[in-house]
Image: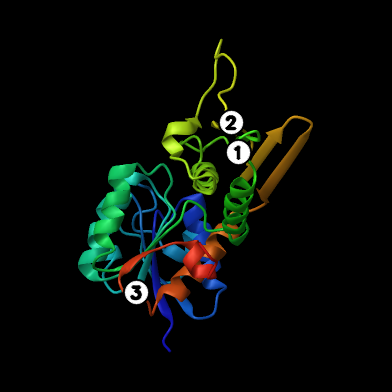
Amino acid sequence: MADLRIGISGCAGRMGQMLARTIRDTPGVVLSAGSERPGSPAIGQDLGEIAGIGRLGVSVTDKPAKLFDGVDAVMEFTVPVATVAHLALAAEHRVMHIVGTTGLEPDHLRAIDEAAKRTVVVQAANFSVGVTLLAALTRQVAKILDPDFDVEVLEMHHRHKIDAPSGTALALGHAAALGRGVEHDQVAARGRDGMTGARHRGDIGYAVLRGGNVAGDHSVIFAADNERIELTHRAGDRAIFARGAVRAALWARDKPPGRYDMVDVLGLPR
């Protein structure tokens, strides 16, 4: 079977460079294209040299349509507005779209569903195998414990992260809500400041920390009187997200059009 040809949107960013290095080190895939926003100093530079993996003879483009021309899959860890535009191109070119963009709102998710009618979209708030297992455990624990156990989701990321709570934290909160059989948005407490009053029974609370170069720490805390259960995942390097994204692309290469996630990739029960 021929190597899977992969393009990277946002190839000059921290995650884009990590994806490039991971693709270079993974059998069965080849780095074929990369794009950046108009005006980026990376435009016209060699994709491999930007990622520190040696010259590839592939120039970074600011033309999204060129990114999707001649590849089998595009990896996207950018911002929602760019992701939505690229989803339409993925559908048009029948190119697999591996989407790790966070901060997605309902209209962005609808765009994913629309593109998935014509091509394969693997979308996850976090492509780490460990975080996928954490979400599955969170759902299971929430299903077992009664509402006397307060649920709090705590996350910490590097100082440069622009959205809060993180997409992973929200995914964990949704997993807890699913386990409890409640609507997440009706019980989510996403910010506390000042005289907030006592905690509402059944709420799923969020706490956000930012600082340093933390790749991503997430904890789900189930706290009742006199006992506490904590489920935690700590990411030491972005490489774990890149490895998961490449694994997802290889898994998806023979799948029919549709929207998939890391639960599908790992074959976990829902």
> What kind of element bears circle 1?
strand
Q: Is residue 186 left or right of residue 82?
A: right
Q: Nearer the viewer, residue 79 or 91?
A: 91
Q: CA distance from mark 1 to mark 2?
A: 6 Å
Residue found at the far left of this picture? 92
Q: Nearer the viewer, mark 3 or mark 2?
A: 2
Q: Which residue is mark 2?
A: 207
Q: Is residue 95 left or right of residue 100?
A: left
Circles 1, 2 touching at the beta carbon (< 8 Å): yes
Q: Residue 6's mark? A: none
- Residue at screen point 50% across, 53% down: 15
Q: Residue 72's mark? A: 3
Q: Position of residue 151 (x, y in %)?
A: 61, 36
Q: Which residue is mark 1?
A: 155
Residue found at the far bottom of this picture? 1
Q: Is residue 101 left or right of residue 14?
A: left
Q: Earlier in the sequence, mark 1 or mark 3?
A: 3
